[in-house]
Image (cartoon, helix red, strand yellow):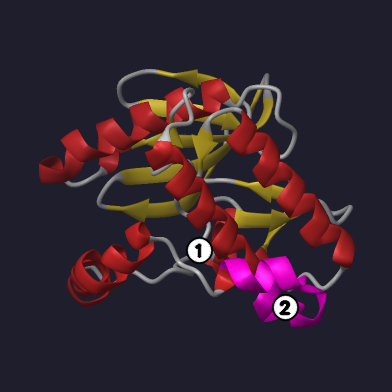
Amino acid sequence: MAAKLLKKDLFGEVLQIEDARGRVIVRDTRGGAPWARWLARRLLANEARVLAAAAGIRGIPELLSHDRERLARAFIDGRPMQLAKPRERAYFRSALGLLRRLHAAGIAHNDLAKEPNLLVSPHGHAAFIDFQLASYRPRRDRLFRLLAHEDLRHLLKHKRSYRPDLLTARERRILASPSLLSRLWMRTVKPVYLFITRRLLGWADREGAGDRGGQP
């Protein structure tokens, strides 16, 4: 069983393997930093819970198996947004439809600001990956609605980057009205987050995107 290393960081490794299930993406926390292993396992457990809740949604990876240290999900064929540079109206319509289905299932992605988490399929359809930070709130309470609003704003920011001419008047109003949660994040948490991830850890939003084939 050949394995291709796609990513290695504090939280372990992401591998692409071929087995009886076909092409599979495996997240393995065992190779991560010992001091970060508890967080890696928490993130893995969260991703497993969210993917299980998203079962059957086309454009979301299928959860194949998981335990305390490893998670396997189905491979989704596609290129990350920053490489594919989508400009077709149909792609953004597809992405908005996928986001609505995700939200209807009580799931907020919470990391759609990163272009590598949005794929463009060979047929021009949208897919979302990397659900470590996602939230599953089946009651869709007030916090969920705030998170869902931010998901939408991040998706519309991408649309503005690639096809600003396609933005509707309503979409422009949404972009102009960040939630209180977003404003608090920008003023308090984000500067600390950027200092830790970029200065101390050397990460970037597009880290590894060029050679991962769309898989985080």
Dividing the image into 4 quarters, which one contains the N terminus? top right
Mark 2: secondary structure? helix
Magenta residues, start to end: 158-174
Mark 1: secondary structure? loop
Residue wearing tag 1 = 114
> Which residue lies at the image location 66% right of the left edge and 79% below the top edge?
161
77 falls in the magenta region: no
Furthest-left residue in view? Answer: 35
> Which residue lies at the image location 37% right of the left edge and 63% below the top edge?
182
> Which residue lies at the image location 57% right of the left edge and 30% below the top edge?
73
State the residue in front, 75 or 46. 46
State the residue in front, 85 or 89. 89
Q: Which amino acid type is shown beneath numbered disc 2?
A: Tyr
Location of residue 153 (image quadrant): bottom right
Q: Where residue 144 sits: x, y (%)?
A: 44, 39
* Left or right: where 40 falls relative to 200: right
State the residue in front, 156 or 13. 156
Residue wearing tag 2 = 162
Q: Where residue 162 sits: x, y (%)?
A: 72, 78
Which secondary structure dominates the residues rendered in magenta?
A: helix
State the residue in front, 128 or 177. 177
Q: Which amino acid type is shown beneath numbered disc 1?
A: Lys
163 falls in the magenta region: yes
> Which residue lies at the image location 42% right of the left edge and 61% below the top edge?
179
Residue 93 shows in this picture = yes
Q: Where residue 193 sits: x, y (%)?
A: 24, 66
